[in-house]
Image: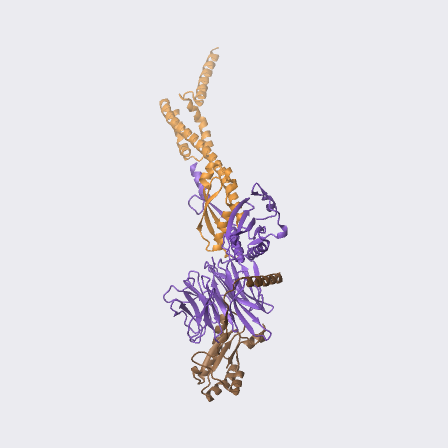
Amino acid sequence: MKKNLVLVALLLVPVMGYGELFLEITKGSEDPYKVAMIPFEGNSKVSKQVNNIMRNDLIRTGEFSILDEELLLPVKMIDDELVFSDWKLLGMDYLVTGKIVNENNSLDINYEIYDIHKKRKVRSSKVFGIPNQIRQLAHYTSDGIYESITGIKGIAATRLLYVNEIKDSQLISRYKLMLADSDGANEKILLSSSEPIISPSWSPDGKRVAYVSFETGIAKVFIQEIASGKREAVLSKDTQISSPSWSPDGKYLSLTLYQDGNAEIYILRLRDRTLTRMTNQFAIDTESSWSPRGNKILFTSGRSGSPQIYELDLRKLNPKAKRISFEGTYNAKASYLPNEEGIIFVHRSNDGLFHIALKYKKENFIRVLTEAKMDESPSVAPNGNMVIYGIREENLSMLAGFSLSGAKFKLPASNGEVREPAWSNFLR
Amino acid sequence: MIANHRYLQASLFSFCIHAALFLYIYGTFDSNTSQKLLISQPLQIELRFDLPSPDIKKQTPTAPKAIAAPVEKTSQNIVYSKATDVIQTKQNNALIESSIANLLSEESEIEADRENQEISMYAQKIITTIENAWMKPKNIPKDLVANLRLKIRSSGRIAGAELIKSSGNIRFDNSALQAVRRVETFSFFNSIPKNLYDREFQIIAISFNPS
Amino acid sequence: MNKSINSFFTLLTLIIFSACSSVQVTEEAVADQSVAGVSITSKSTATQAVLANAVVYFEYDRFNLTSKSIQALKGVSELMKRNSKITISIEGHADERGTREYNLALGQRRAESVANYLVANGINRNRLITKSYGEERPLSLGSNDTAWSKNRRVEIK
């Protein structure tokens, strides 16, 4: 009798061998979470702004479907308990409520998240604000809500760098290096110049930027402190330098130098400005970018006859560049996903159009993620869930973005054209 | 009347022979009533051919020999019949024992089937609950598999979730953990019988395998 | 939807920008068109004319000289041989397609191709300064083949 039971039990336990029940989940939902957000109470001027910022932050992630404000129902409470049935009828997954409170001369936000299916409150949080930083407060709150529901860190409180170009009536250009919130608002000018600025790059601590400026007549890399505006050329050498990229520990900058007349990759140790050469061959080597753990570098090389992506393992004594892109005749400007499980880059398809593509390490094919004609300069958000890039629409350059879950958004320039975006790290 | 006298003697003699034959056939000469079974036993043995007991099959060929012997000598008859009696008893007991064992195992198989059905039913409920809470990320590589081990209290509350096999993709792993967090409690666990819960549902492994 | 976002951001920017303390803005004037150590000699108008004519064009994705371009460079080569004091600046460009940094490197390769030709023709290398502007200084502003072909060039100054 016991024998038979054991036999049957073993049939139910194919692999585990522990005698554990082993169940397979094969289906899930790909729809966004349906969230109802009751406008947070508070001073009307402030609350309107905060509510708008939060709604936009969450919609832009592509993982939330926020109920239209007109369809919101009054929040019914019985004995301090929320009445869930109405929200369930509306098909909601979550309800978010909150208050903006004024304490000690600064604004704080208290918010609650209710899980409609489980019929209980799943989160109650307080976000502390800094005086005069209402936008930041709203972004922090959006991130808190996003993280509670999805388990992923939010990027609403991160920032963007990009280049703005405005042509005057004589078609003379003015270039500006801009800093803004992740939604493109709160713009600040870091540099204003009559000569081109390209390739802005964030330091990992978010306090400095590196960029290429043509102000001396040739391409040169500068490092600038955001708070003070202090800046310096990264090398006093006379050669053309471009394509700066910070190492994750902030101690090194990888660069492209044209010393021999040919673009080659070097690593600069910031402490003593010593240079180490990383490539040495006749073709173009440029667009270096570091892996999240700082042990590898991606770069674009023309050594196979056309621009392709290569990888260098810095831990090896004599690192040899390994080619990792094989589809198509133009693959460039690659950067790693934060978990190193894949890369995002610019890919030219067979019809000659440029798109942003994704290639997972474990797959041997690429996924084209955008559809316009001249998409360029992608930058990955620190949570690996969103990408911002440059797009051209009706002869005007602007920024566009997408989430890996399929949502898309655009960030047009408030004036002129914008391009070359760079997404900061988490700033908290 | 001298002819009738002879007729009577012949009739008596005939009667005695017939009676003896008759009595022999019906086993009055055997001291043991179990001899009667000699006639019916072959039938019984045949009936028991389809039972999965090797003992009976072995003994069937030898039994007729033992049965044949008692016809010649009564004393031997008794000895032999005793020997066969023992064999028969053993056979019978073995038959009875194995038939009981088989009945019992049949019953427990039915019982096990019923239990397995119950386990499957609750397992399916667990699967459906998790599937309803799982937000599968888009744009992920194919063939991703993430395995979690869950510790569940008898109330159904998920006391712990551990990622025992990562899919290699952080969004996928995270979505699996998040699905389990969203479920939080399996409300139907209260109806799982205690012995079943103790044995099968305290610790379970779940595999997120959309392909 | 775009329009309202656009105007919203403009409004927001104006409000916030005026309210917040701004980060120090750095203004940089254009420095002299000279690279330390070697200065480009000033040239007579006649010389300048010859150089202005010697624009070399390139095919898409390529930096090799065509026979047409070699023709254009013959004049430069002779000019430099005649006047041994002249140093020239060879500036490479690319059309807007592709990534900016790769185009910067491509422009440099194109400039180098021209420099190599002149060296092969007996001109001393240290009379030649090569630089690249990538796609940053297009001659023609369209997004079509004609505009693009005009921008894939090397100018000599």
Which chain is assigned orange?
A: B
Question: Residue at the location (43% across, 78% down)?
Answer: C36
Q: Nearer the viewer, residue A145 or C82?
A: A145
Vertical placement of residue A75 versus A155, above or below:
above
Res B52 → quadrant:
top left
The colour assigned to chain C within the rendered structure: brown
Which chain is assigned purple?
A: A
Is residue A325 something one can see in this rendering?
A: no
Is residue B23 something one can see in this rendering?
A: yes
Res C5 → quadrant:
bottom right
* Residue C1 on image: x %, y %: 62, 60
* Residue C20 on image: x %, y %: 53, 62
Question: Residue at the location (38% across, 63% down)?
Answer: A315
Q: Nearer the viewer, residue B7 or A96?
A: A96
Count of labels in the image: 0
* Residue A63 on image: x %, y %: 55, 54
Question: Residue at the location (42% across, 44% down)?
Answer: A18
Q: Is residue B57 left or right of residue A378?
A: left
User: Please, which residue is most extreme toward the front here?
Assistant: A104
Q: Nearer the viewer, residue C121 or C126?
A: C126
Vertical placement of residue B60 versus A189, above or below:
above
Q: Nearer the viewer, residue A332 or C13?
A: C13
Vertical placement of residue A383 versus B205, above or below:
below
Vertical placement of residue A314 versus A146, above or below:
below
